[in-house]
């Protein structure tokens, strides 16, 4: 091979240059699957492998051959494919394309070597690598529409992601799995206050601003039929209606009349999100929709009502009661013509109700995400949530935000059925080494320590439940030299500290728990872990050389840590090594100028 420089300082073989030139001429018209991609144009995004860096291990490459650099740091990149409408300009010349390769190589090769200096990550997608988990209940206060799952607001007001957190695993294929829980009254959306659409009021500066049926200034009350009283007040963005001092036969009302609906009356939906704070014995709360001719449809909060009836909002006290019913389906609804009034009537005794959402103008219902359930044939089905009371589970937050009317929802609280997995933790929570075992049957020995450390914040609550692991070997007694846990730690444990016989760390052996179990068994490491201290698992486990290679083979892993084909899987020899070190994303960025 006679090396040549193109551009200066980047040495490539003739074969490498010929291949890259041909690649440039064909891409993206070439069959994308030949390069491990979905069909169509796209862009490549390299994801740097998480590593542990130390100054002593850091290396840099200057004026080195790319072939050597690629072999020095072969695990530099993971790849993910992102759909894009962008295309490589067909007038890009060979020089510009190769200059892009060179520019990317200079940046990526030097940076790659330093990033890999900690030894890389374990391949948690490999069956013989332990990936223990802790089940947990996680509550996050304030989840905004642009947040990712498990994002929370830290005490310094920054948005943080919860390390290691994933949604809890499905129990089995037949049990509904709804690991995210929300509550209707803890959702803040504009649509709760949008009725009536044309209502305005005047602010302190004399300007017209949007108003709502949840503003108390637009309601009138009548307690003439009662020995008690009724009040209408605002609580944050909600409206509270409370009747007190009532006796049998008493009636009080609160009325809202600042709207008119004069078409499609039967199609309109009475939408309520309410808290029933107080419902005294014998008290009945009736929500009436009244038209210009005094025709009325009603829905009730009544302990003696039929809970399955269309006209029943609730039969008991509770929070986050979601009620949505088409007016034409209620008794008398077919007669409605020009709706002009909403009346909340309390009779017989005391009641206190808070309205978080009220709407009459829409012909569609709010959608509160997707929920798995079983049908009458015990089959697992997924349904849209329209009515619920209190906390209820959905499959994911994405199913909530997919609805147009919920797309801007801010959740005051969200609860997760969670699991903290080692494979999802930052790489510096994990430390390991392989060494000779001195044995012929299992010639390698893996020493490792896994750490769990949990953040604290006012807007975050973590309750740990049970710490589990899975036995990964067919003959556990031949493999596990030692498996030990430590709890209540002040800081994370290094591998050196874990192996130090003079360390003051108190370790509890779980070796017999592993060796007495069978392959695939889930074993309990601790039933009482707590999130206010660091937890650690250290292991001393025997492997074969080939197993070690699999356990540390992460170069072609996808972003989830699972093995899979990628662009590099179809490239071989020195060309594959060159492209691994260079990174096609750098080429694309250079050409497109991004």
Image (spheres, grey):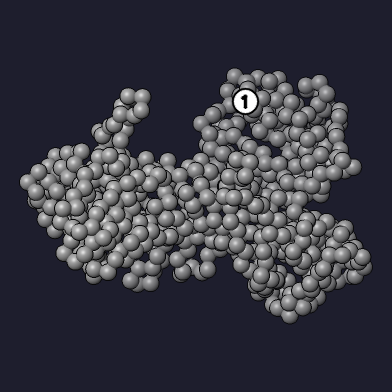
Q: Secondary structure at mark 1?
A: loop
> From this viewpoint, is residue 309 visible?
no
Q: Is residue 447 above or below residue 26?
A: below
- Say whether residue 306 is left or right of residue 273: left
- Residue receiving disc 1: 594
Q: Give the quarter of the figure containing the C terminus.
A: top right
> In the image, residue 167 lies at what x, y percent?
56, 58
Q: Which residue is at a point 83% across and 23% down the rendered structure image?
A: 9
Pick the residue in front: 426 or 33: 426
> From this viewpoint, is residue 90 visible?
yes
- Say whether residue 304 is left or right of residue 402: left
Q: Which residue is at a point 60% across and 58% down the rendered structure image?
A: 462
Q: Give the quarter of the figure containing the N terminus.
A: top right
Q: Which residue is at a point 86% across and 29% down the rendered structure image?
A: 62
Q: Which residue is at a point 79% across and 72% down the rendered structure image?
A: 508
- Determine which quarter of the picture holds residue 279: bottom left
Pick the residue in front: 113 or 511: 511
> In the image, residue 322 lies at what x, y percent?
33, 56
Pick the residue in front: 341 or 10: 341
- Say whether residue 165 is left or right of residue 514: left
């Amino acid at each position: 091979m006679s090396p040549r420089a193109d551009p200066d300082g980047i040495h490539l073989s003739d074969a490498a240059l010929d291949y890259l030139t041909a690649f440039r001429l064909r891409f993206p018209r070439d069959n994308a699957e030949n390069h491990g991609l979905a069909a169509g144009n796209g862009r490549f995004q390299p994801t740097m492998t998480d590593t542990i860096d130390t100054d002593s291990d850091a290396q840099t490459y200057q004026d080195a051959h790319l072939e050597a650099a690629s072999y020095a740091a072969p695990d530099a990149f993971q790849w993910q494919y992102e759909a894009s409408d962008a295309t490589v300009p067909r007038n890009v010349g060979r020089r510009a394309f190769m200059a892009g390769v060179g520019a990317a190589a200079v940046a990526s090769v030097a940076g790659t070597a330093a990033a890999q200096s900690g030894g890389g990550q374990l391949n948690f997608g490999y069956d013989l690598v332990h990936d223990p988990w802790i089940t947990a209940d996680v509550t996050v206060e304030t989840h905004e529409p642009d947040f990712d799952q498990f994002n929370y607001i830290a005490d310094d007001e920054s948005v943080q992601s919860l390390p290691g957190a994933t949604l809890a695993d499905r129990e089995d294929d037949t049990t509904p799995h709804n690991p995210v829980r929300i509550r209707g009254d803890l959702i803040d959306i504009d649509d709760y206050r949008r009725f009536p659409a044309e209502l305005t009021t005047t602010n302190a500066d004399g300007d017209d601003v949007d108003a709502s049926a949840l503003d108390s200034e637009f309601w009138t009350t009548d307690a003439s039929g009662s020995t008690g009283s009724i009040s209408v007040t605002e609580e944050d963005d909600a409206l509270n209606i409370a009747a007190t001092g009532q006796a049998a036969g008493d009636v009080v009302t609160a009325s809202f009349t600042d709207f008119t609906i004069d078409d499609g009356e039967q199609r309109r939906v009475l939408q309520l999100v309410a808290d029933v704070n107080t419902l005294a014995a014998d008290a009945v709360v009736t929500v009436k929709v009244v038209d210009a001719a005094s025709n009325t449809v009603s829905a009730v909060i009544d302990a003696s009502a039929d809970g399955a009836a269309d006209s029943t909002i609730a039969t008991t006290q509770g929070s986050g009661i979601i009620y949505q019913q088409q007016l034409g389906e209620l008794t008398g609804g077919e007669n409605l013509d020009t709706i002009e009034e909403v009346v909340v009537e309390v009779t017989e005794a005391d009641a206190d109700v808070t309205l978080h959402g009220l709407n009459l103008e829409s012909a569609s219902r709010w959608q509160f995400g997707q929920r798995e359930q079983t049908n009458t044939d015990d089959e697992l089905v997924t349904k849209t949530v329209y009515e619920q009371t209190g906390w209820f589970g959905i499959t994911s937050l994405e199913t909530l935000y997919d609805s147009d009317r919920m797309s801007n929802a801010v959740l005051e609280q969200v609860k997760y059925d969670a699991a903290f997995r080692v494979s999802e933790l930052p790489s510096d929570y994990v430390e390991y080494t392989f060494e000779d075992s001195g044995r012929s049957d299992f010639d390698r020995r893996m020493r490792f320590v896994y750490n769990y450390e949990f953040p604290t914040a006012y807007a975050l609550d973590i309750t740990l439940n049970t710490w589990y692991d899975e036995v990964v070997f067919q003959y556990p007694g031949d493999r596990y030299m030692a498996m030990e846990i430590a709890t209540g730690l002040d800081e994370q444990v290094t591998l050196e500290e874990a192996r130090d016989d003079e360390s003051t760390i108190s370790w509890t052996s779980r070796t017999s728990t592993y060796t007495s179990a069978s392959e695939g068994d889930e074993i309990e490491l601790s039933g009482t872990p707590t999130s206010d201290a660091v937890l650690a698992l250290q292991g001393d486990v025997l492997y074969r050389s080939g197993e070690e290679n699999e356990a540390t083979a992460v170069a072609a892993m996808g972003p989830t840590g699972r093995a899979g084909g990628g662009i590099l899987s179809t490239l071989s020899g020195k060309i594959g090594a060159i492209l691994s070190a260079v990174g096609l994303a750098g080429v694309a960025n250079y050409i497109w100028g991004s």
